[in-house]
Amino acid sequence: MPPVERSFTVTASSSAAAGERHLTFASATPWATLAVTAIASLSLLASVLRRCRSGFDFTDEGFYVNWISDPWNYSASVSQFGFVYHPLYRLADGDIARLRQINVLLLFALAFALCIVLLRTLRDAQPAARRWHEGSLLGVALIAAATSLSFLEVWLPTPNYNSLNLQAMMLAVIGGLLADRETSMRSVAGWILIGVGGGLAFLAKPPSAAMLGAMLAVYLVLAGKLRPRVATIAVATAVVLIVAAAFAIDGSPSGFVRRIADGLSLSGQLAASEGVIGRLFRLDEFTLFSHQRTAFVSVLVASSVIFGLGLLGSHRARLASALLVLAIAVLGAAGIAGIASPSIFRYDLRPVQFLAVALGVALAARIAAKPAMRVQPEGGWAIIILLLVLPYGFAFGTNNNIWDTAQHAGMFWLLAALAIGVRYSPACGLDWPKLLPVVVLGLLISADMVFVAAQAPYRQTEALDRQAVPLDIAPGRSRLFLSEDAAAYIGGLRRLAAESGFKEGDPVLDLTGARPGLLYAIGARPLAAAWTLGGYPGSADVVVAALGSEACAAIATSWILDAPGSASAIPADVLRPFGIDVSTDYRVAGSVKATAELAPQPSENRLLKPVRGAEEARLACEQARH
């Protein structure tokens, strides 16, 4: 008997040691995953900041920089993003790369702040959730914030009305989470942020601001936070911000209203065949290619299985979940660092995959924690509903497919997945390691979108990493790395302009209809509009109307850049109402052949120089106007 007793003692001790090692390994795995993925998130951010020095889209980005660099040059506008970002342009000293980096850092910082506030709000309102270690909460928030980089899926990092709209929405949602019926400092700060976010959204895109206000109002009612007396703080803040902007931009509210009305009139002429209501309230078709549908189902199943395993009571199931998440995190980190095969990030994923993660988490919570899937106090469904519908509010009023635009704000769908995971699995004692599948999958999806965008940047023919020719854009202020064709073209156009007597700051009327960035690249002042957009039935009428707000002295001395034979070209007849006949009052200074990167199809751009005296041309313009 004594030998048997000794044997039993040894066996029990071995089992206890094995169990302790198992528990130690199981508890260490989430921390390892958190560390690896947090570093990968920062690496992804660093790679985006590095790539901000490369590439330039001469269409949309050309419009953005024309507007931001000198927003007071234009008297009609619906979006005022140029005025909002102009101080950042000055801070960056006109450096486009630095301006882009500031914009990306703003997006990431606001997303990080939103994730922290969201997780703390969900944690504090969930009695069954453990009091997470603050370091783990910050780590999860950091990883989730990387999903904001999915905004760059088409690679337009230069600040624009969409980036301002998203930043404003994040501020407003942070405010909505902090706001309450009481007048505590936290609550007042929340109501102020709602007002600031709403005001900035109005300056970015008025239709989205209206939809954001409606969505936040519904959320605040459902969450039991709305109280008219404290809600006036948000309204007053938004009004003060907009009125202050009106004085800063146009000197008076009446001038500001006139600016917006004129902007609406001009945009209406481009799409005169559609009614305003028809353009606003649309659903459009939500289309995905076959490989994207396959990816959607795969992400849904993966998130459901991995998250579901973490909810089960079995230690083995939860360990399996933790190991799967760690493997995905290591694979993603290796791909971001360039250690693993770059084919990891070539699946052309879309932000709609974040919605697949949310659906997978909801399915897993429903199956693995049936008793817990009930409406919780403190408006448990309210924040989830808000996060799910915010992308539609972001896209509301767009002229493009509304769901394609909504996906630029797809990070809200990923945050909805986090909210579902925390709020509707309380019976499982949910703690932060169980949220890792959500944020790790979100990081992997975001990294794929960033790397695919870098390989095929918007309206550019070369991958960003292969654009290696340094060129000064707007001489002396911004150096970007461009493709050989783009750099050769801009260099040729600059030489032609300089040899013809063009000076930086001279007005130029862009009749190409498609490449406003060319004017910025040679240092010209765009006449009439930041982008004289061609290819629409009302394009010529819009240019005539916009020229009506220009002084005759500027019109008289303006140069012309055109693209004969291009489908987007604007006819030179737009100058006839101002006493100008291009065939007699201008001569062709020269031409440069545009490559596919600078035009939908190869074409020739001509630079035309005025030949009449400035005073004679001014008098002819004024006489024609009268």
Image (cartoon, grey):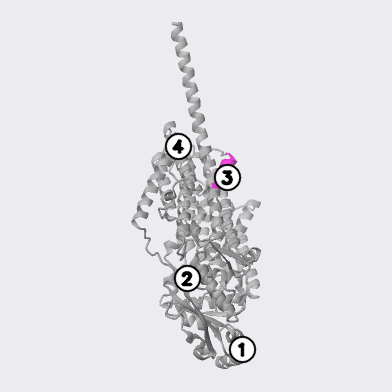
Q: Nearer the viewer, residue 414 or 619?
A: 619
How far from the left and from the top, in percent, is residue 427?
46, 37
Disc 2: which residue = 598
Going from N to C along the chain, the mark reached first, 2 or 3, is 3
Disc 1: which residue = 614
**Three-letter code, disc 2:** Leu
Q: Nearer the viewer, residue 560 or 573?
A: 560
Disc 4: which residue = 323
Residue 134 forms part of the magenta stretch: yes
Q: Is residue 530 visible?
A: no
Q: Nearer the viewer, mark 2 or mark 3?
A: 2
User: Image check: 46 left or right of 308?
Assistant: right
Magenta residues?
133-142
Q: Nearer the viewer, mark 3 or mark 1?
A: 1
**Three-letter code, disc 3:** Leu
Going from N to C along the chain, the mark reached first, 4 or 3, is 3
Q: Nearer the viewer, residue 254 or 292?
A: 292
The Cα–Cα distance between marks 2 and 1, rounded to whole angstroms, is 32 Å
Which element type, helix, strand or loop, lies under badge 4?
A: helix
How far from the left and from the top, in percent, is residue 185?
66, 52
Residues under numbered marks 2 and 1 in contact, where contact means CB atoms less than 8 Å apart? no
Residue 56 forms part of the magenta stretch: no
Q: Which mark is residue 60?
A: none
Which element type, helix, strand or loop, lies under badge 3?
A: helix
Q: Where does the C terminus fall, quadrant-wise?
A: bottom right
Going from N to C along the chain, the mark reached first, 2 or 1, is 2
User: Image check: 308 left or right of 97?
Assistant: left
How far from the left and from the top, in percent, is residue 247?
65, 72
**Three-letter code, disc 1:** Ala
Q: Is residue 262 above or below residue 25?
A: below
